[in-house]
Amino acid sequence: MSATPSAAFHKRVTPGGWAAVAWGLGIVFTALLRMRVPGQEGPEVLPGFVILRWDGLLMLSVGTLLTLRGSALLARRPTSALNHLLVAPVIASTPLGVTAIPFAQYLAVDVALYAIAASRPGREARRALLLAEGLLVAYLAVRALCGWAAGTTGTLAVALAALVAWLLGRSEGQAREYAERSRAQAAEQAVTTERLRIAREMHDTVAHSIGIVALQAGAARRVIDTQPEGARQALGEIETASRETLAGLRRMLGALRTPDTDAQERPEPGPAASGSTETSAEVPGLPEMPGLGALDRLAELTGNAGVRVAVRVAGAPRPLPPDIDLSAFRIVQEAVTNVVRHSGADSCTVTVDHRGPDSLAVTVEDGGPVPGHARVNPGPGSGYGLTGMRERVAVLHGEFTAGPRPGGGFRVTARLPLPTGDTTP
């Protein structure tokens, strides 16, 4: 049996569960102090006569019930839970014949202080600490006013232990908040950088299209008198290129000029699937502005890196707008790069589906790690992992999914809508 289920069990236990466990351990420790154990001539603490009577056992039972109730409330109502947990040691300490609340009876309170300090806002966490420390001071004050003996040094040790538990919890909470802020900032920066990259690529695409328009316009001007049919064909190509460029600009600008308010809320898979976050760079051997026509070359380059890529095309290929063609290739390129870097697989499948009447779908999937397969690093990637792929799809108002496959491995799917109808202003 592996150690994984054990680790999962520890993660499943709630802070309230640990508080109940701490109370039970405290009861056991208290009982051991009051009985003779092997190696001792007698018990370290003589049991008071009250604890052996029915009323003493009743007080211990009431304290236990309060602790269990407080443990159950700790996740939902921490303030109410702490009140239950604070009353429990006061009641349970009464039949023990002690001059201060023992450390063992305060263990559950320490666990609650740690949990509250780690997960609740600073003001609520500080109020919980004041309640826990204030109870100890009040307990000593009541005993002193009644003329009873008061265990000041013992109470001081219990108070210090509670303070240490609170400080540890507060430290963990601050570390978690810092990690969350760092992840959110990294995701926001990745989205911004990827959008700038898309804008640069779109600029290059538009510049290329305008260059074609200029060439065709010049050719049409030269032959308009001698070859009207050639001029008509050149003007038709100018119209097509202009419409495609205008449609691409509209898609890009419509998304990029709207701030992405939910980028930080998008779920990310685990580290093995999250993709690379290095600075983007072109892969040697690919065109400067590639499209799906360069998939075979990408497969060849990836095969040289140790991972076989099978390219499948469903449906009849059709002409694509330059921005969609480029984005589809970039999505496939990044997904394949993630397979090489993170999956440990020796092969993957790229499927380009043209069968949708108004959309293009690309899928990259692998079968998972191969035993004994050595991972290789092919060099710089083409974007920002899943964040970059998701952003490209969002710019084109498409659909993106990424996650583990049911039979093992990982699958990335992007569905990009194709423009239909007239694209003129």
Image (cartoon, helix red, strand yellow):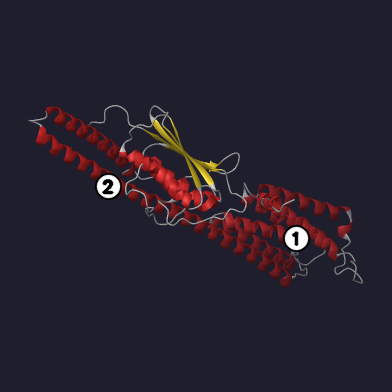
Which amino acid is tagged 1? Gln
Above/below status of 420 relative to 217: above
For the question of whether residue 232 can be seen, the reply is yes
Q: Identify which residue is drawn at 47% across, 57% down.
A: 182
Name the side, left or right, on which 200 lies relative to 397. Answer: left
Q: Nearer the viewer, residue 4 or 215?
A: 215
Assign the C terminus to one quadrant of the image.
Answer: top left
Name the side, left or right, on which 198 lies relative to 132. Answer: left
Q: Identify which residue is drawn at 91% across, 70% down.
A: 42
Which residue does the numbered mark 1 point to in the structure image?
A: 105
Foreground disc of the pair 2, 1:
2
Q: Secondary structure at mark 2?
A: helix
Which residue does the numbered mark 2 point to in the structure image?
A: 204
Q: Identify which residue is drawn at 24% across, 36% down.
A: 241
Q: Secondary structure at mark 1?
A: helix
How crowded pointer 2 is (Cα within 10 Å; few <14, some 14-19, many 20+) is rated as some
Q: State the image coordinates of residue 103 (x, y, percent, origin top left).
A: 74, 65
Q: Nearer the viewer, residue 240 or 10?
A: 240
Above/below status of 3 relative to 164: above
Which amino acid is tagged 2? Asp
Q: State the image coordinates of residue 264 (x, y, percent, origin top left).
A: 45, 48
Q: State the image coordinates of residue 332 (x, y, percent, origin top left).
A: 43, 43
- Tags 2 and 1 touching, CB below 8 Å: no
Q: State the image coordinates of residue 78 (x, y, percent, origin top left).
A: 62, 51
The disc placed on residue 274 is: none
How crowded pointer 1 is (Cα within 10 Å; few <14, some 14-19, many 20+) is rated as many
